[in-house]
Each structure stands twice: as structure tokens, then as C-alpha cells.
Amino acid sequence: MDSKIIQKINNLLVEEFEVDAESITPEASLKDTLDLDSLDYIDLIAITEANFGCKVKPEDFHSIATFGDFYNYIDAHTKVKELV
Amino acid sequence: MNRVVITGLGIYSCIGSNLEEVKRSLYAGKSGIIYSPERKEFGYASALTGYVDRPNLKGQLDRRARLMMPEQAEFAYVSAKEAMQMANIDMDYLEKNEVGLLFGNDSSAKPVIEGVDIVREKNDTMLLGSGYVFQTMNSTVNMNLATIFKIRGINFTISAACASGSHAIGLGYMFIKNGLQDCIVCGGAQEVNVYSMSYFDSIAAFSTRETEPSKASRPFDRDRDGLVPSGGAASVILESLESAKRRGANILGEVIGYGFSSNGSHISNPTVEGPAKSLEKALKDAGIQPGEVDYINAHATSTKAGDSSEARAINSLFGSSRPYVSSTKSMTGHECWMAGASEIVYSTLMMQNNFIAPNINFENPDEDTAPLNIVTSTLDHEFDTFLSNSFGFGGTNSSLIVRKWKE
């Protein structure tokens, strides 16, 4: 996967959820690291759509456990790779 | 019936972002009014406004809390925090006791407009994220502060146009007086962003004296030409005397009267009878005679009709005793939903510090305002009892009477 996409995702998450960049690794838990509650998932859906042009269905998060899963999901669904 | 006392004050306004700054501005007769190029460019006929910066709450509140707050909730948070510190109410006390929250607020224009703009552009509500819904509702100040401060008592918003803040305190007084609550954080909040007051501007409510911002708000003056909008937030901690004594709180004053009425008339044109009835009911509730009121903090917003009607209403009841009168809106502009609460803060500060702030820009009376005893320059004067008026669109009126604390 393009490392620029990963970097862009990480930067967005650090800014939106105010976490340390070092805490984000491909193996780390998305939910635990970002301390996501039900409203935070809505924000995650919004920034994903705004920045990558892909609509994440809430149920898709059932299969997105780690940041690595999230990168792969965006890589597979994004429509704006050229803008990265 | 419980006696209801004031044990905390907090203020975030265009004449100061805390009690000390505001006290100095009131004493100095300092105007907080500016000319806003942003408003002119946006299309306002009058670009005059009181202005406050958005406080930087990063580090004080977490991301989730900040995401849900429009600017007026931020202003309210700052004022409530100051009031709670003054009252010596901390998070431990809030978690263990049934403290209430009654705030006046009557709009939240910025998130409504910006959110709708996003949806119009992308035709997808999911892009709004989670924050807008909590920012856009009229009860936004209550829902945010109640969450942050772990409020467990009475909790709702009072929307009564420019009397919202005053009615919030009046209702808080009623709840405590009747033994339903021991302690309530009351207040009022008002947004100041470019969208918030465009609808007022559209009905030519504002002064157009744009070349002299500090002279534009001139309540009761013959040459007044309209109000100047403003905003921020004010908080007043009301408490039963028993609760205040039990906690060993410093008592700043006692709310002794709340009067209210509705004009039953035009949506924006004032009457004399409506405000006069509110004044009468406040005096009756307080059980005092007009001569016992030393100072009236008038609603007077600097509009032709409104100031005249209020002057006549005041004169109808206080024509013999002629208490000192000033409108602090001459300095602050009209703080609208917040005004009824901020003016209790301003007047209590004056009473605590033995002065009456001037009604700046009062240079010439007109026929209706001439009978009033208007304070034109800062008066060093010890006083015991003041009355504060607030009136709003739809003819809603509120009058509060506060007395210096004595056993």
C-alpha cells in the first residue's frame, strides 16, 4: 500500500482524535487507541468520506479491528488516490 | 419558603473576560463596542457589535466535550467555572449533590448554517459528523454544561428572547424558594458570530452610528438610533440560605423579588403597561416599597420606542422615589439572551464595590426619559437594593430585585 495513504490517514486520526502519533501502529487496536465511543465512529465515518471519498458503513467496522485493517479498507474503497 | 442567596458570579463579556476586568470596566465607563469589517462585508447595514474571542479550551476540556460546543456554550463554560470557583463548588460537590442548571439561550445560528451548507454541497448528512447535532439545538448550553459539570438537579434551557437570562434566574429563585432545589447555576449565553444577528439587522434594529462605535449605544439619550448587538455569557449561583450557611459560602446578595408579565400585544413594539406590571409584581414579591430600591439597572437597549416605554413604566412606579437608573448596555451593547444574567452580575459587582456604573452617552434627555434619575458618570455610592429589568420580543418581561445580604 502507498505509504503516503497511511501517513495521511495517521495525520488525520492524530488531529481528529488528539492521540500521540507513536500510539498508531498497524497492529494496534483502532477502538482502544482512539478511545472510540459510538459518536466517535460517526466522526471517523465523516472524515473518511470527506478525505477519501468512501462511505464506511457502520457494520463494516465489525471487520476493522486494527489500524492495518483500516488502512486496507480505505485502500480498497478510496476513490481519491490521485489526491493523496 | 426558603431565602435565596447569591454565592457565585461569573462573566465573559466584551468589557472583560472575568469579574475583575469587568468591575474595572464598569467603574471606568468603558465601552466594549467595535466596528466589524466582517459584518459589513457579510451584508449588515450596521457593522457595530460587542465582541468576545472564543476561549481556547484545549487542555481544559477533552476533544469530545469541545466538539459539541458552539461558541456560546464555551462562553458559558468559562463564566460558570468562574462562578463555581467563587462559590467554592468543586466537581466532588457536584457529583455528590443535586445541583441544578438553568440557562437562558435563544439561538445557535452558526452551527445550523454551517452544517446545512455542508449538506447542501455534498447531499450527505453523514459528512456532518457527531458534533453538530449537539451544537445546533437551542438547549445546547444546558446539555454541554450539564455533561461537563455532572449536573444532577433541574436542567433545562429558558428561551425568552432578550429576557432569557433574567427568567432563568427568576425560575432558579422560584425552585429554591419553594424548596425544590438547594443550589442552581443560572445564567445566560449569547453567540456573537457573523450569522447570529443578521436577522435583527434586517429589521433595522441596530444603531448605524458606525463612525463612533463607543458612542453608538446610548440608552435613554434623545439621539439614540438603535441597539448594538453583543454577547458572551454570565453565570449566577443561586442557593438556599440554609445550603449556603451549611457550606460556609460567602454570600454576595439575596434575590428577594421576581416579577414577570406578558404584554399581550405586538411582537416587537413595546408597551408601558407590560413592563410596569412586571415591576409591580417584583416589588410585591419582595414585599418592599418603591422607595426601598436604590438603583435600577434598566433594560434600555438604545431603541427609540423601547427606552421610552421603559422610562414611562419606571416613572409610573418610581416617579416619587427617583432611584438611580443606568443602562450598562451603554457600555456592553445589548447582550440579548445573556443580558438578564449579565446585568445581575454587573449590578451585584457594583453593590459589592459601592459604586454605580454610568449610563455612558446619555447627553440629552427626551420627553420620556427626562424624569429619570440617570447616572451619567460613575457614582461612588453605597447601596443595598437594586432592580434589574429585561424585556424580550413577544412581549415577555422580567424584573428581579436583589438586596445586599444581611441576616
Image (spheres, coloured by chain):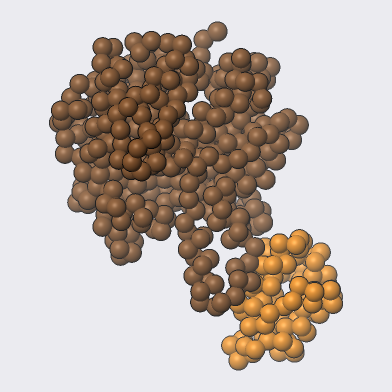
Chain colours: A orange, B brown
In the rendered image, the residue lying farthest to the top is B407
The residue depicted at 79 percent of the width and 70 percent of the height is A30
Image height of B107 relative to B168, above or below: below
The residue depicted at 63 percent of the width and 83 percent of the height is A53
The image position of residue B210, as x and y in percent, is 22, 52
Is residue B55 or residue B144 the one in the foreground? Answer: B144
The image position of residue B95, as x and y in percent, is 74, 35
Is residue A42 or residue B29 the one in the foreground? Answer: A42
- For the N terminus of chain B, the quadrant is top right
The residue depicted at 37 percent of the width and 33 percent of the height is B263
Can residue B378 be seen in this snapshot?
A: no
Can residue B169 be seen in this snapshot?
A: yes
In the rendered image, the residue lying farthest to the front is B264
In the rendered image, the residue lying farthest to the bottom is A82
The residue depicted at 16 percent of the width and 39 percent of the height is B223
The image position of residue A80, as x and y in percent, is 62, 88
Quarter where residue B391 is shown? top left
Image height of B311 relative to B14, above or below: above
Is residue B27 or residue A21 the one in the foreground? Answer: B27
Quarter where residue B312 is shown? top left
- For the C terminus of chain B, the quadrant is top right
Image height of A26 relative to B231, above or below: below
The image position of residue A39, as x and y in percent, is 71, 62
Q: Would residue B319 be found to the left or right of residue B123 on screen? A: left
